[in-house]
Amino acid sequence: MSTHQTKALLDAYKNFFPTGVIGSYINGELQSGTGSEISLVNPATGELFLTYKDAGPDLAGNACQAALAGQQLWGALSHAERGRLMQEAGRVLRANIEPIAQLESISAGKPIRDCRGEALRVAEMFEYYAGWTDKLYGNVIPVPSGHLNYTRREPMGVVLQITPWNAPLFTCGWQIAPAICMGNAVLLKPSELTPLSSLVVASLIEKAGIPKGVVNVLAGYGHTIGQAALSQMAIKKVVFVGSPATGRKIASAAALRGIPCVLELGGKSANIVFEDADLDRACVGAQAAIFGSAGQSCVAGSRLLVQRSIYDHFVQMVADGANKIRLGEPTTADTEIGPIQNATQFKHINSMIQLGLKEGAQIVGDTQVAVDQKDGYFVRPTVLKNVTNDMEVARTEIFGPVVVAIPFDTEEDAIKIANDSEFGLAGAVWTKDIGRAFRVSSRVKAGTFWINMYKVINVASPFGGYDASGYGRSSGIDALTEYTQVKSVWVETAANPAQPFGYAPTID
């Protein structure tokens, strides 16, 4: 066991929870689980960090009751007061960026410089939505009957949010902030592999004055506490970020209860490079699109579509750059790519690379793939060429630092290949022809699309997918409508009101 790393993780955690207890955060208190033991593994070494117990169904029920009570308190505050408290939450988070980043880097295996940026983004999320608490209105509708008819936007109530292991801190803030902005309470179920930063965020926003019970965090497995929480009548909506297979199960379970979902699922995004593009910029963008976060990003530009006239040259450029990327221990300042977060994903990535080679793809450059998990779950950036869009490596989400390079001939050809996928989360085009850029952006099926850039998102802009990449939007104004329900209110204004609908009811 890596004593140094384990001590560093515990020290980072104890900055926020001095007892060191790892459990669920319910109604302002850490509560130990009663279920089976869960092991947290250091992805940089493959060694055991520490263990904690799954929350268990009973705690899921307790968390729902705490959320109901918290929502009553939170929803009773004025919109302006909620905004002030959310601004204060942003300030408290900003004051703790470094310890939050250290905790996330060690537990999730993400480079420390990336974690610092993500911690800052989370603070910005609360600040952004703080400004929206009193600015989303209903409408007055000029109905033909002469009645006063107006609408109110009211909270859903208690929302279940399930977040993934690849970006636990970022998705925690991304989901919680818009939900509580609109007066809801949250029951957050992070991945059992990466619960620590979510526990910290919940505790810090309470220090800012947000009432206990407004945000509760359940630590444990989806098949135990996730299912138990979803079955609770208190849950009025479920938001899921993760794999398409699990997303379909979540949506089915929600449908049986008759409650709505927001799903943000996988991607196999097309990054399209035309021969007239600035190739140096496109090369850097292509590397960032797939190798950032070790490829563990839903919007990763995992399909690199390159015009045939520049295919060999450009693919070699990307591979040459990939070979210079620094892999290393996540908390080291100059590390650019950390390990894959867990053993299951590590095995999947390696198996997909081998499958690609069997299908006829070729590795470009000096790619070296770790096979001994005792040395950590590291996978070097990998570029596969001679790929066609019907190969499995071009159709299945690899979710690692592996890009498949596919040639195309014409603009129409590029659009056809880009859209020949079950997914529709993101995409990009690189060209100096602005007309072409607009044409391609309008025709590629994707919830987010970039022109001469890649992988820039902001809390103010809507985010979500098409087709198998999910539905609903999780940021911007669009997210606020996801977290409200509309009530239509009718007021009689006539001195001598007529019968409803202009006629008397018929009695049989």
Image (cartoon, rainbow, N blue to C red):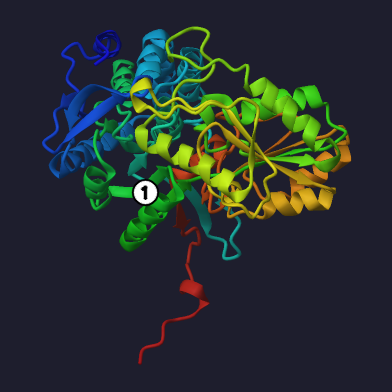
**How many numbered tags mark residues here?**
1
Q: Residue at x 16, y 38 (%)?
A: 59
- What amino acid is at disc 1? Lys
Is any part of residue 49 visible from this angle?
A: yes
Side (left or right) of 381 relative to 420: left
Q: Answer above or below: position of 502 versus 443.
A: below
Is any part of residue 182 visible from this angle?
A: no
Q: Answer above or below: position of 320 versus 238.
A: above
The quarter of the rendered structure image containing the C terminus is bottom left
| Relative image position of residue 446 (x, y in whole percent) | 64, 46
Reading the image, the residue beneath label 1 is 237
Side (left or right) of 464 relative to 155: right
| Relative image position of residue 19 (x, y in whole percent) | 15, 13
Q: Residue at x 51, y 26 (%)?
A: 293
| Relative image position of residue 226 (x, y in whole percent) | 27, 45
| Nearer to me, 278 or 455 | 278
Mark 1 element type:
strand
Residue 39, quarter of the rendered image: top left
| Relative image position of residue 105 (x, y in whole percent) | 40, 17
